[in-house]
Amino acid sequence: MIKKLLTVVVIGLFLTSAFLTTSALNIKKESMGFRPYYIPLADIYVDDDNTLGPWDGTIDHPYQFIQNGIDAADNEDVIFVFNGTYIEQINVTKSVKIVGENKINTIIDGNYSQIVINIISDNVELKSFTIKNSNGYTDNAGIKVESNNVTIDNCIIYRTKIGIYIFESIKNFVKNCIFHTNGNGVLIDSSTCNTINNCQFSNNGIGINVKKSRVTNIDSSYVHTCGIGIYFEESYLINILQSAICDTNDNGAGVFVLRCKDINILNSNIYHNGNGIELDASSSVLIRECDIINNTHQGAIKFENCKDDILIRDSLFFNNFQFAIRLINSSIVIKNNNFLKNKLFAVYSESSKFDARFNWWGFFTGPSFFSFGLSDRIKRFPFKIRYFPWKLFAICGIGSDWDTNDKFEKIALPDDLHFQIEIEGIDTDDDGCPDWWEEKWGYDPESKDNHSQLDPDYDALNNIEECFTDKWGSNPFYKDVFLEIDCINSSNPEITNKPSTELLEKMKSRFKENNINLHIDTGNFGCGEEIPYKEFLTHSDICNYYWDYFLHNDLNNPRKGIFHYILITNYNQDESQVAMGWDHIDYAIVDAQGQCERHPSYSRERLVTYASMHELGHTFELFTEKNFAIDNVCAAIPLYREFWKYSRYKSCMNYRYVYSILDYSDGSRGKNDFDDWGNLNFSYFKNTVINYP
């Protein structure tokens, strides 16, 4: 009985003590004029509302700035930061834990500084913050980690050149974070043992960029609506587990791997990308138990120059728009997979050999060698491909064991991604457009109009943007398209990569015939510059050149959202392509020297101009989902029925005519023609939604 009484007394004292402690904290916070609620115990408190002081880091007198709290802390201290907006550039020089009250409402705004949070010390934890607004130069970042054993948890990071930049660092963890509208969501460079877990990446030029690093683990993460979902270069020991990589740029890749070794992609969903997975000069690859579905470009999985220890097994290849697997100068093993309803080829190989036994090809008769077979088609090379015996029935229980929509939900982007363009002149009604422009176009300068929402000609340029471009001939009542073309210099100073004025005028006339004014800046509008010579651009370079030469490293550059952008290079990854340099598909690359070597019968000027019009079409959402003849490789080869089926589709978007017709089609030629002009999506380049219908 005594023991029971003692137990009751001890429990009562414990609960009373806990109540008094919590109440004391609540009373202290309430005394400062805030609502009472539980406040976690911490060593140091920070509150931007304490503008008058005093400041000693206690709950009664919290520091106003996070940096003050860090400066006053000892190693292993916990710093608690109350909700608010902290316009700071922070250096973390001690092994501390920094916790925000709420990840949505505890905001660190870098105000376009080089680094918003620079973590220099080992053993740091940063949790529950929104971090935004770095500058736009090469190494600028929301968070830079140059130390070891750092954990970044439950944060939102956006409007930065690089969300998190991990450099020459060991054993870091990024978990439960959201990255959107960054040049790179996460960049891992020359680092070892880094893990990304349960994170979401959306509307980034590159979601995750890993270079010259070892042991990178990406687990339970969701990457979508990016230019390149995940990019690996010269890295080793890569693991992608239970992740969804989808809805990336139709000319890009969900996962791109360049000169890497020891790659495992397991139990993941790879769907509706350009190329689902693309590997170049890589080895020791295992792709297992994946759903690889609805990828639109030239390979749900594409291998080039990959020959050592490559295995694809236990996976589902379904409804990929062109090739389920494309091989160029590669050698792989494909085993125990289901191939079903892939539209052009299940396997398409060039200068390659592979073992494709023990797979299901959609019908018990095995793979088809013809486009009219009941099963999926393969390109046959005797003695180089082994496909017999095949499975007589579909293999049960393969592919991933989870559904993306059950596990992930796409985030909604915030409202503060856009900025007001400032235009000189008296603006009597303060509606964003000065009086002179309103008088010119029939608006009342004394009556406030919502010009940021008005777009009377439906060209996706609102009246404020039309006012900004008035000096270049813009008309708010007639469709305008603005295009900047920059050129990297050729290795030969006597050869230019610039399109000819004559051909550009011809291109403009095609738009004019369809009631659109195309304005091209090749230097006459203040940009359109020539860029110092560089031989070859990787996907990572392509992203950086967009920031350097189109944005000029300015996140508030007013040309963003007004101009489409084309960069003419010498050589680049994957030939000519449309790209996402930042958050939307407004960017295209044309490889001049590569084009000349692939098509020697045409002049350089013709090749770059015609290819530019083709790639520009993609920035208006002319993709294969709208018309299967667009970017259809077989439509350019007389051997295949697609060549004849789409012969009436006379458009530069058709690979058959890309260098012979400088025009889009109007759909007037009958069956299998398509009205490109009538299907231009003028807003796509500034509001890109990549979503399989």
Image: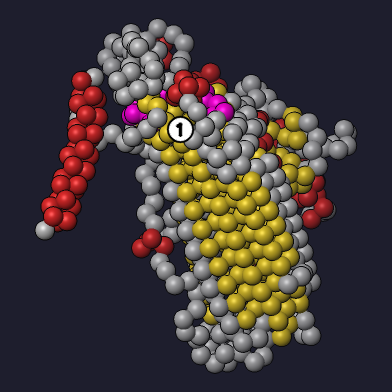
Q: Is residue 85 magenta?
A: yes
Horizontal side of 639 relative to 448 (left or right) equals right
**Amino acid type shown at disc 1:** Asp
Q: Coloring scheme of the render?
A: secondary structure
Residue at position x 51%, y 47% in the image: 174
Q: Nearer the viewer, residue 172 or 546?
A: 172
Crowd rating for badge 1 (residues with CA inside 10 Å; few <14, some 14–19, many 20+) = some
Which residue occupies 33% across, 18% down? 61
Q: Which residue is mark 1?
A: 77
> Residue 290, how many percent across, how many down?
53, 70
Q: Residue 394: where, in percent of width, then height?
A: 50, 86
Q: Main secondary structure of the magenta part?
A: strand
Q: Position of residue 405 (x, y in %)?
A: 37, 61
Q: Is residue 678 visible?
A: no
Count the labels in the image: 1
Compared with 507, 200 (above or below) is below
SS for callout 1: loop
**Magenta run includes residue 670:** no
- Coordinates of residue 597 in the picture (x, y in percent): 82, 53
- The magenta stretch is 80-93
The answer to which of 600 and 431 lies nearer the viewer is 431
For the C terminus, the image quarter is: bottom left
Please tell me which residue is depicted at 65% across the width and 32% down the height of the picture: 138
